[in-house]
Amino acid sequence: MSTPRPPLDGLIVLGARVNPQGEPGRVARLRLIHALNLWRTRYPECLIFLTGGLKPGAPVSEAASMARWSGDWAAAQWGAEARESLACRLILEEASHNTAASARNLVVQAQVRQLRSLGLVTDALHLPRAHFLFRRQFARHGITIHPLPVPGVLKHYWQRRRYLWLTQMALREGGAWLKVLGQGTWRGWRR
């Protein structure tokens, strides 16, 4: 028995590193493929929010790179009509440089569009913190966030023996959690 899928007004795809040629890295591509398949098979009426600003040394913002790649991928998978349909649904959030900023910036866009329920697409390692940050911002405005983890990212890197990459990601995520928790403690102490 499958669990019923929640009704969604939109999908949020969190940005990730762009390579020197301006193409999304592997993590971003895996997130996009998952989101695009969800859009095509389950949520064809959804808006798709792509996040990520311009990082130093990158030729293009994460969101713009992801949008271009998504259109090409959708056309290759489903034809030119899919690219056109997708282009009408993409909304780029190019001002953020981290997950917390993405949550702050996207809550405004969701409110303006009167969206009530959004899916959050990222990899399993990043999802707990991302969901925490988005839920904290969106719940105040009556907007529900549904986690939609990308399947197989960690397995993909484990099978390819990319242990250093996995260690770096785990350490970075752990440090990011410490920052989030530290900021919350600092705010509580100042009050």
Image (spheres, grey):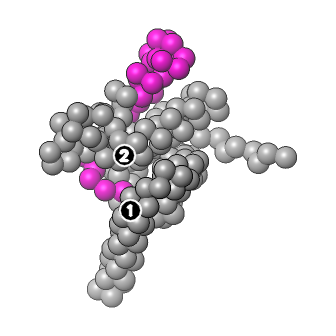
* Mark 1–mark 2 distance (CA, rounded to whole Å): 21 Å
Using the rendered image of the protein, determine whether residue 126 is visible from the camera's viewpoint: no
132 to 107, vertically: above or below = below
Q: What mark, if any, has residue 2 been given in the picture?
A: none
Magenta span:
70-99
Find residue 171 and report its image quarter.
bottom left
Find residue 72 and report its image quarter.
top left
118 to 40, vertically: above or below = below
Q: Is residue 191 magenta?
A: no
* Residue carrying label 1: 164
Residue at 52%, 49% in the rendered image: 156
Q: Residues within 10 Å of mark 1 (few under 14, many from 20)?
A: few
Q: Nearer the viewer, residue 91 or 37?
A: 37
Q: Residues within 10 Å of mark 2 (few under 14, many from 20)?
A: many
Farthest residue, direction left: 57
Amino acid type at circle 2 is Gly
On-image quarter of the C terminus: bottom left
Residue at 76%, 48% in the rendered image: 3
Mark 1 or mark 2, earlier in chain: 2
Position of 12 with respect to 145 (left or right) is left
